[in-house]
Image (cartoon, helix red, strand yellow):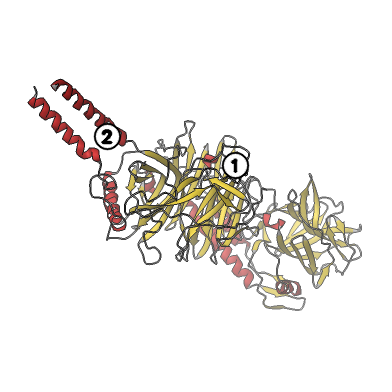
Amino acid sequence: MTHSLFVLLLILLLGCISGYAEEEEPIRRNFHGFHFLEFGNGDLVAIDGANLYRWNKHKVEYMELLTPASGEGQGAWWNPHRNWFRFYPSGYNGFPINYGSGTPFRAVFALVENNNPPSKEGAHPVRSKNPPTPEYSFIHIVWMNTLNGGIGENSFTYAPLILKFPFEYGTARVVRFPVDTISPILTTKNNTLVFPVQFVTEDNKTISSVMYYRPHDTKWKIGGALPDMDTSNPAVIEWENDKLMMIAQHPSGHYRVYESTDLEKTWAESTSTLSRVWSTSTVTTDIPTTDRGSHNNSITATIDGKRVILFTQSLVSGPQNVFYLWLTDNTHIYYVDFIATRPRAATSSLLFKNGELYFRYETVEESGKHKVFFVDLTTAMESIKSVVKKWTEQDQILTESRCCTDESCASVCRIPTIGLVGYLSGNIDGNKWKDEYLGVDASVSGITEKVTNGLKFMGPGSGAIWPVSTNVLARQYHFTNYAFTLVATVTIHKVPKNDSSPLLGVRMWDKNKHSILLGVSYNNDKTWSAINRGTKSKSTGTWEVDNESSLVLTFKNGTGSVYINSTRLHVGTNLNIEEVVKISHFYFGWDGESVEGSHISVKDVMLYNRVLSNEEIDVLLRSRMNISFSPSDAEQIQEETNDKSSQEQNTPQSSTTSTPAKTPVATVQPESQPESQENQQPAPVVDIPPEKTQQEVNTTENKTSTETTVPVSSTNTKQQDLLQNTTQSMINNNVNAHKNKSIDGTVRIYESVLPMLVLGLWALATVFP
């Protein structure tokens, strides 16, 4: 009997130990994302990803943010120590903290959980009155405390939200998020919290949108959807006049840019400057769904008082991914430099702080592991500042320019600079007619002669081409396919021998041949003719040899206009550009076909990304411009931007790995489920608007950077303990946390039973030897 009792107690003890070990195995979710984070004390942290540990049986969980380094300055990114920031939920309350101006709390990240799709991947959707079994996803809003005191600085907490799938979104049925990912939360000037999201429909297409929360709202809301299907990897920035911009990859192979001033309803493609400019060389339908997350490849910055956007472009070149840095003020676009090239490169992010610029990107190894690289781009800031200064000065020169007639020069004529993208004047370098705004240069051919603020073209083959869609990296003037105004001052030096000679115009690429969309020619009877789709209109107006004339071409929504001096030439309205047809270039002088060529001078050529008003056009037509401009200014800046060091600093490199984003989906609490813990509020449910906009299914290497691979090291225990203590204090102020040793304070039965069983076993062994 005694021996049997001893064996029984031993079996019971082993069972408890086995149960204890089993209870210690949580479900772990890996959230993938590479972003920069600034603490309240100014320290910078580069976030690798996050882990969420959840014990579903006991409703317990905690989170870790993973980062390879912290600190500030160039050397900080080479710190070999890895920090794990562990923190805990503040209860099922989406907004446990007051935030905004004057408060120490800031929403920094949204961790979006994927869920199991109701139907198989790629299966044809079947509409039914009986909806599929609902699936639920958590969205964890991570908050950071920046207060230097109180409950502690650099501390985090998070609050989960619940979103139920499927749901109707416009004309589509959304079934899940594409992947577990980290999205940075943008706090706008009016304290609206915004982060990008992507949804997967039941027919396996992706929809990009945002989720947002305004200070007066009671729930997070889903914003309007982008007007194009299958956009991916969106990034959101705030621009001027409370406008948000979203940059996303598109199956067409170019980044598309969208704008919104009303998050609840609409996003519209920004065709005025930035959309469809940068090539991705990747059709996003080929990107695995699990690789589609939010990016941070575009940021805003204020440089010398001017608001600008810094953007990194990723292109595939053979087996390599190549990164380029661009600068724009949403009017002008400037190519800064080549950054880096790596095989299998994936997501990237930028950080600008205190005049220093950093770039961070990851590569995916064949094993599925991720390797992280940092690039210090601070050396590029000198050329960036020079370009921004040039843009400002050039606007000032044009604004203060004088306009002249045959009799005299008037006072300041205030040339409009809003929407002025490019300006060709007196800066000539060999066969390049250089843009004064340092954008796209025109190519010159044939016999030419430099004149004040322009060029003189003499004879067959003499002319200039200003490209629109011929650049592989970027099409800076793609906006011309939607609307533009082209302004120039021209002088005809010789009466053509034939019927007419080309003056200037716009050519488009149509079915493997160039044709003239809109142009102007001058005739041997000293009249003008407009050209529409290659057809010349009847002659009108008159010109005189060696007399200057002001010429304006406008185009918008398939309608073009031509103004010469005070005369508007007749132009047909059939100028619509089909989707497969693109504007190729502007031409001046030789049009590529004329045998006789042209004998003309062209100067002060200005290209706008909009149609000027009648008042603005009237100013340009009534007076000929005599703009004072020093070519040495542009040449000096061009030399500065091209004079970049090709020397890489030799820095020790070692591998960095992080956990892949592909993980099993954990069970989450449905919104209709009763409260899972005593005295705990239910997780807020995301508000889904009932109606949405209908969806349309529609290298040069010149490095200036120092690149470093960041290795993985041990946990920073001191900072982890600090964050655990300060965050636990925050939890106690928001929920009724329990008081024992477990992660959330919940009493574990086995913690008290196990010691008692050991004591009883010892007593039995003593009493019954």
Q: Amino acid at mark 2?
A: Tyr
Which numbered dot is residue 204?
1
Left or right? Give the position of 248 relative to 468. Answer: left
**Residue 562 to residue 185: above or below:** below
Q: Amino acid at mark 1?
A: Asn
Which one is in front, 318 or 462?
Answer: 318
Residue appearing at x 38%, y 50% in the figure: 45
Q: Where does residue 515 sit, x and y in percent of width and height?
A: 81, 51
Which one is in front, 761 or 39?
Answer: 761
Left or right? Give the position of 661 relative to 588. Answer: left
Q: Where does residue 575 sit, x and y in percent of width and height?
A: 79, 58
Which one is in front, 763 or 479?
Answer: 763
Q: On the rendered image, what quadrant is the N terminus found in?
A: top left
Residue appearing at x 47%, y 31% in the figure: 367
Assess whether mark 2 and mark 1 are in contact (beta carbons under 8 angstroms).
Answer: no
Q: Where does residue 87 sit, x and y in percent of width and height?
A: 33, 49
Q: CA distance from mark 1 to mark 2?
A: 42 Å
Residue at the spot of label 2: 20
**Residue 341 to residue 556: above or below:** above
At mark 2, the secondary structure is helix
Q: Quadrant of residue 492?
A: bottom right
Left or right? Give the position of 433 relative to 234. Answer: right
At mark 1, the secondary structure is loop
